[in-house]
Amino acid sequence: MGTVKCVGILTSGGDAPGMNAAIRAVTRAAIYNGLQVKGIYRGYRGLITGEIVEFKSQNVSNIIQLGGTILKTARCNEFMTPEGRQTAYETMQKEGIDALVVIGGDGSLTGARIFAQEFNVPCIGLPGTIDNDLYGTDTTIGYDTALNTILEAVDKIRDTATSHDRLFFVEVMGRDAGFLALNGAIASGAEAAIIPEFSTEVDQLEEFIKNGFRKSKNSSIVIVAESELTGGAMHYAERVKNEYPGYDVRVTILGHLQRGGSPSAHDRILASRLGAAAIDAIMEDQRNVMIGIENDEIVYVPFTKAIKNDKPIKKELVNVLRELSI
Ligand code: ADP
């Protein structure tokens, strides 16, 4: 039996649809297993300032369908300093919190790893990011919903692109990972995706133009991952205007709307399973692992592995997009 009596839960970094379903799952699974739960507001900032409330089962009623995070989220530079983390540890002791569940992306889990090491506090991470860029899990909480939001938008853009015979560059989020762009392109029937993973290998714009979409199509949609490595959609629109005049080019940047909205069934189920598994892990005295899902099975991924390794893009997906966009 585990040694933990009280679990603190926080959401940190970029918000993602399904975070609320995860908060609900962690809270209910903890209570079910006889643990006390405390909700920490505004990510690590709330851990430093003590913005903490005890959560009962009813605190998480009626939230599974909500986007965003009821615990709020924040970016907290103070937690990046040893002094900030020391204050956070003191708050935990004062509140009687003896384990943490952190829901967030790469940065949030890096913070959890450092904190866990410094103060010997059991920390469990849940992958909460629309980018799907955490290694060791097939998918992350929020990714599926964001992908569906992209589809809805691109379907609408296609109507106007076709009517005017235009070339649209649609920019989607993804930071350094092309999952949203590539799978968004496949699912929306876009003609190409420009992703950071290949930006040093080939000129993806030239490749797309060379593939000669004009032979069979008058309009076209290219999904571009927002990233310093790709340069973003505006960059490609400018290039086409300068290097290939004659195309009627437009840009749509989907931006923050990709983060919002009610989580999909997939994200709700994923968040529920991962949240319940986080409490299983705590009961088993696991520490410093991210809970992931691989081949539909729950897996424990050491923080160092989840954060340090780049999740590879499947070449097969690139080929599918290329073959089907002729
Ligand atoms: P995400 O979790 O979505 O990747 P960020 O990268 O902004 O978001 O990280 C969220 C928060 O996690 C930061 O504001 C900070 O409080 C904490 N964090 C990130 N990196 C570190 C680090 N190296 N050391 C300590 N805390 C960190």
Image (cartoon, helix red, strand yellow):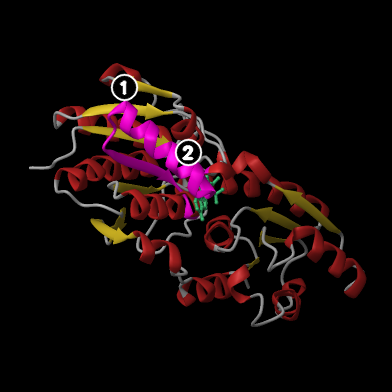
Percent across and percent down for residue 169 are: 74, 58
> Toward which corner of the image does residue 86 lie, by quadrant?
top left
92 left or right, relative to 254: left
Q: Residue at x 67, y 45 (%)?
A: 255
Percent across and percent down for residue 211 are: 70, 79
Q: Residue at x 49, y 49 (%)?
A: 82
Of the numbered discs in the image, which one, if any, rests on residue 55?
1
Percent across and percent down for residue 203 are: 72, 79
88 left or right, relative to 1: right
Indicate yes or no whether the magenta region holds residue 181: no
Depicted 88 relative to depicted 289: above or below: above
Where the N terminus falls, by quadrant? top left
Q: Amino acid at mark 1?
A: Phe
Q: Specify whether tag 2 is near ligand 1 (CB below 8 Å).
A: yes
Q: Main secondary structure of the magenta part?
A: helix
Of the numbered discs in the image, which one, if any, rests on residue 44?
2
Q: Specify whether tag 1 is near ligand 1 (CB below 8 Å).
A: no
Who is closer to the viewer here, 31 or 265? 31
Write down the region rendered in magenta. 79-106
Of the numbered discs in the image, which one, if any, rests on residue 220?
none
Indicate yes or no whether the magenta region holds residue 81: yes
The reply to whether residue 21 is in sight is no
Depicted 194 relative to depicted 58: above or below: below
Q: Residue at x 92, y 70 (%)?
A: 242
Mark 1 or 2, which is nearer the eye? 2
Q: Are marks 1 and 2 in contact (CB under 8 Å)?
A: no
Instruction: Provide the secondary structure element on which disc 2 rests.
Output: helix
Percent across and percent down for residue 245 are: 92, 70
